[in-house]
Amino acid sequence: MLRFIANRLLQAIPVLLVVISVTFLLIHSAPGGPFSAEKAVPPEVARALEAQYNLDQPLWQQYISYLGDVIQGDFGPSFKYSGRTVNELIAAGLPVTAELALYAMLVALIIGISAGVLAAVRPNTMQDYLPMSAAMLGICMPSFLLGPILVLVFGIHLEWLPISGWGDIPGDKILPAITLGTGYAAYIARLSRGGMLEVLSQDYIRTARAKGLSERIIIFKHALRGGLIPVVAFLGPAFAGLLGGSFVVETIFQIPGLGRFYVTSAFNRDYTMILGMTIFFAGLIIIFNLISDMVALWLNPKLRQQARGDQ
Amino acid sequence: MIDSSQQAEQGSSLWFDAWIKLRKNKLALVGFVILLFLIVVSLLTPWIAPYSYEEQNLMLGATAPSAAHWLGTDIFGRDMLTRIMYGGRVSLMVGFIATAVALIIGILWGSIAGFVGGRVDAVMMRIVDIMYALPFMIFIVLLMVVFGRNILLLFVAIGAVEWLTMARIVRSQVMTLRKQEFVEAAYSMGLSRWAIIRRHIIPNTLGPVIVYTTLTIPSVMLLEAFLSFLGLGIQPPQSSWGLLINYGVETMEEYPWLLIFPGITLSLTLFALNFLGDGLRDALDPRASKD
């Protein structure tokens, strides 16, 4: 198990290097410098600015020194928010986005798994069709459409819930979490239905039934563990999607998190900010993929044996 | 249950079987009809749109749906139905072209890796693995920022993201095909590798490829709408459903129909494509069929 983790972490290094190199090259090949938007900066000021951000050095030197900084966990200063570093901005946005993602994931897991299990227990009945049609609706209703509609209905017409902010008014976290979580609830419902159907047809479930165990114990104690493996495998990649979703949800609900910072810096052409955040996101995604692989391994004894056999 | 080798040999009956199965699937058929309708409307838009694309009527302003403007007008007095029809052209075009880009790269990459095998295969699939781990959504945002919001770049960027799964599907399909007798026979007749890939391997991988293509189009359209919603995709004066939703959100309190109609159109299209894709999967791939 330890070797598996070490192996995967070693594999992550070239991936991160590719990410850093590609983003670095992309950003430095962008037409127009980061300061070209500012109005008529005197040449000596421009030179001073360039010297401050090392832009006067040759590209490979900038790359080496940036790489050195990144390895030490330093993403440098922000181009647009003067006096603030990328690290500070990430530190400010991360807790907000993490909380939002956590709530959204809770919404997705609770709704998704219950709907999927309900559907799988009685396949091809109304108890199957209704949740699965709802899941299809959830998949076809992207967050940038669902969010505004929820705002329109629950915020503006019914006036039940606040429509923007984060932690300012009680209840302002509900709509963002539902908006971000619904799409994943739909996917998880489909995955857990498929997984449960497969497990429920296996011999050990028949044995459990033959032993006279109650349906409740069969489902929750025996089937769920195997049936949820596809869901767990989905959680790693889903995390990458949650980050993308946070761009939209944080923009709609005006939440000061990483996603909104990223979109804002994309509009402002805040190059160091984009560079730093891209690398940071890539690192996060790699870590979450690793965690979801490990949980899948822990849930599935067959895979565990294979991993041991490889050593 | 018929195994896949037999099916590969009896191509025509596989397609016939699939058609019969698909015809029984009502939802998939509905999806197919909706999709055909949208494509026809998009192609004919310049001739059948009730108003011209640029036509503004500032005196009129935003009005609710009426007999003259079935889906209402926006704040510049532009007819919403016309705007949605023109936006659909862009949205569908992005969906189809970006999927085609993904299709071409994915099929070539997957069939070469699967067919050549050995070290070439290992290296090629390792590259796919590495690219899977990259945060692509973020990369596309990055590309749009760096190189400006160019529609051609959007096609290529989205296509470049979506080919990975296609490559994997084609490769595994090719791996099973290349060991079969008719491929050996082709070898013994002295056909070149490229000719075998082109004449024998690619046609036989079509089933799963068609299924995955149908399911890729909605995800591509979703990606385009997502980018346009953030203001990083399609730029005015061009329009797409994502962009219309973006505008609709700004004025949804006063004029909710400006959000609701493009929203319904986008969702309906995604519905149609997803149901058609699911139906095709059940019809073309007996192993993957539900329960």
Image (tube, rainbow, N blue to C red):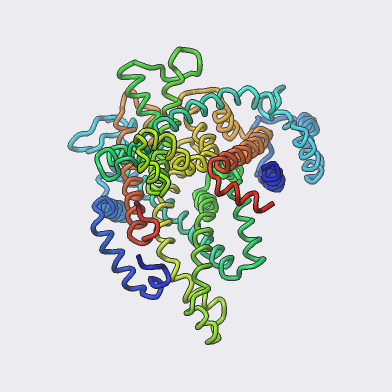
Q: Is residue A283 visible?
A: yes
Which part of the image, by quadrant, shows the N terminus of chain A?
Answer: top right
Return the residue found at the far bottom.
Answer: B189
Return the residue found at the far front.
Answer: A211
Residue A184 % position (x, y)? 44, 36
Is B22 or A42 nearer to us in this picture? B22
Q: Is residue A18 visible?
A: no
Residue A208 % position (x, y)? 39, 41
Above or below, A303 against A278 in this view is below
Residue B222 % position (x, y)? 43, 44
Return the residue found at the far top.
Answer: A169
Return the residue found at the far left.
Answer: B67
In the displayed structure image, the side of residue A177 where residue A297 appears, left or right = right
Residue visible at 52% across and 38% down in the picture: A235
Residue visible at 28% across and 41% down in the picture: A129
Is A309 or A6 nearer to us in this picture? A309
Above or below, A260 against B133 in this view is above
Residue A214 % position (x, y)? 35, 34
In which quadrant of the rendered view does residue A298 lie? top right
Residue visible at 42% across and 61% down in the picture: B208
Number of numbered markers: 0
